[in-house]
Image (tube, helix red, strand yellow):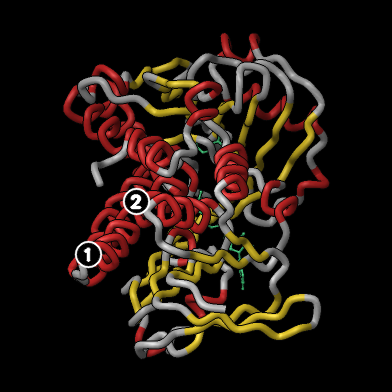
């Protein structure tokens, strides 16, 4: 088989890129090692920047997002037993974020791909990119025991943190930067109305807590936990009790609970790969970088990578110029590092670190106080939270 762009990975990065290419008349094939149901079973953050919504529209996949997504104009930073509202809309001159689950966004992209006849090969085993340093790259894989080959012009490595694309690059050609945080997030999904109409990021002596939502009837809550914590040790009741203790009293009293239908622990990590291009192989999204979920930047960074790569590919095929492809890595990394910095900063500001001494604790408190009382500081937070421009 032959295609113009072979895309490894059918997560949000691969699907969004595939859809933009298809809309532009550029032939592409997506391969994933797992099936559709498995991909749609993953639970991830759901805060979309306006740029991500714009790209979904450009990919003609934004209709349900506009109908069902919840536009949010602000969020609460809770500490000292009170809410301190960050007025995203007022501070950024009218910008807001959209609350819409990543699972739903993925579902919309998959549905649109099926309608537009794009080819996705699910359950592809041993996917492997070859010869991407030369002019004629190809991909090999196996499906139901039979070996296949796809020749292509370019390979997009959209296969997440554990994918094969980054691992295929010679060690001497790549540099990785990593920071592991000394705690995780225990998350719970339940069909209960959210405790507040906006998200609450709570800093508390017992640890961080986040109140988020998927809709007005489905809530997503998180509490900071030790890295070695086990989900089995957390009954729903224990989770609700701990969450209540970390929230201001009026929220704790208002919290409505329901049986959970998902509970899991995620470690927190910052990770960046440089460069993001190796000849005709381009790394996109989680394959190239990971951020802790605190600023909800993971999916939005994947979207900006897709924007830069799609623009470069469109320029290559339509204008016969490689300028955009040549600039891909530098453009994407400039935005990635700013989001990595923001996610690291927000994580540092609202979690309790196991080894924090009295001095560091006082600095954290001063930072929160400054942030919520200085318009300049709040504006910097809001500007980053709604998303820096592409
Ligand atoms: N071969 C083929 N497919 C693979 C391979 C492989 N060896 N390894 C991984 N994949 C597939 C996975 O099965 C998955 O469906 O690649 C896809 C990668 O999807 P994601 O992990 O969702 O990564 P990405 O599309 O970049 O999405 C970024 O996901 O983790 C969140 O915070 C992150 O929201 C951000 C978004
Ligand atoms: C979520 O809804 O899962 C969520 C929201 C905001 C975050 C992280 C996760 O910062």
Task: Give residue 70's mark.
Answer: none
Residue 388: percent from the left, percent from the top? 26, 41
Note whether ligand 1 is within 8 Å of mark 2.
no
For this view, does 57 lie left or right of residue 180?
Answer: left
For this view, does 210 lie left or right of residue 330?
Answer: right
Write the residue at 25% across / 20% down. Answer: 94
Q: In the image, is residue 147 above or below residue 259?
A: below
Q: In the image, is residue 242 above or below residue 253?
A: below
For this view, does 32 lie left or right of residue 24?
Answer: right
Find numbered disc 2 in the image and state the secondary structure of the residue it sits on: helix
Write the residue at 63% across / 31% down. Answer: 221
Residue 175: percent from the left, percent from the top? 36, 78
- Along the viewing direction, whichever of 107 and 163 lies nearer the viewer: 107
User: CA gap, disc 2 to disc 1?
Assistant: 14 Å
Task: Name the quadrant of the N terminus.
Answer: bottom right
Task: Give residue 324's mark.
Answer: 1
Q: In the image, is residue 276 above or below residue 212?
A: below
Which quarter holds ligand 1? bottom right
Quickly name the residue at label 2. Answer: 304
Residue 48 falls in image quadrant: top left
Residue 60 falls in image quadrant: top left
Write the residue at 68% across / 29% down. Answer: 242
Counting residues from the start of the chain, the first of labels 2 and 1 encountered is 2
Residue 227: percent from the left, percent from the top? 63, 55
Of labels 2 and 1, the one closer to you: 1
Crowding around mark 1 (Cα neighbors within 10 Å: few <14, some 14 to 19, many 20+) is: some
Do the residues bearing badges 2 and 1 touch, measured as CB atoms within 8 Å?
no
- Along the viewing direction, whichever of 330 and 268 lies nearer the viewer: 330
- Along the viewing direction, whichever of 241 and 323 lies nearer the viewer: 323
Q: Is residue 44 visible?
A: no
């Amino acid at each position: 088989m032959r295609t113009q762009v072979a895309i490894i990975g059918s997560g949000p990065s691969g699907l969004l890129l595939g859809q933009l290419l298809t809309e532009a008349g550029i032939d592409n094939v997506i391969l994933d090692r797992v099936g559709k149901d498995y991909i749609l079973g993953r639970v991830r953050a759901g805060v979309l920047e306006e740029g991500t919504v714009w790209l979904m529209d450009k990919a003609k996949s934004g209709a349900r997002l506009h109908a069902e997504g919840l536009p949010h104009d602000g969020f609460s930073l809770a500490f000292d037993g009170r809410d301190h509202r960050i007025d995203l809309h007022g501070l950024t001159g009218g910008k807001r974020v959209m609350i819409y689950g990543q699972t739903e966004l993925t579902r919309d992209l998959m549905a649109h791909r099926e309608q537009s006849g794009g080819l996705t090969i699910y359950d592809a085993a041993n996917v492997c990119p070859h010869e991407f340093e030369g002019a004629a790259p190809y991909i090999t894989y196996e499906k139901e025991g039979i070996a296949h080959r796809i020749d292509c012009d370019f390979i997009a490595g959209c296969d997440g943190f554990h994918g094969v694309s980054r691992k295929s690059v010679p060690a001497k050609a790549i540099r990785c930067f990593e920071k592991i945080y000394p705690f995780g997030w225990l998350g719970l999904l339940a069909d209960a109305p959210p405790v507040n109409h906006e998200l609450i990021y709570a800093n508390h002596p017992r640890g961080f807590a986040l109140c988020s939502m998927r809709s007005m009837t489905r809530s997503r809550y998180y509490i900071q936990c030790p890295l070695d914590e086990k989900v089995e040790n957390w009954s729903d009741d224990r989770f609700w009790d701990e969450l209540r203790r970390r929230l201001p009293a009026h929220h704790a009293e208002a919290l409505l609970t329901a049986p959970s239908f998902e509970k899991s622990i995620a470690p927190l990590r910052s990770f960046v790969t440089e460069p993001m291009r190796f000849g005709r192989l381009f790394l996109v999204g989680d394959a190239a970088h990971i951020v802790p979920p605190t600023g909800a930047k993971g999916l939005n960074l994947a979207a900006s990578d897709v924007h830069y790569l799609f623009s470069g590919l469109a320029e290559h095929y339509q204008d016969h110029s490689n300028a955009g492809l040549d600039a891909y890595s530098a453009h994407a990394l400039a935005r990635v590092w700013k989001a990595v910095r923001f996610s690291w900063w927000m994580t540092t500001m609202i979690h309790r670190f196991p080894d924090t001494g009295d001095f560091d604790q006082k600095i954290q408190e001063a930072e929160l106080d400054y942030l919520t009382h200085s318009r300049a500081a709040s504006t910097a937070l809001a500007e980053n939270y709604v998303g820096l421009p592409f």
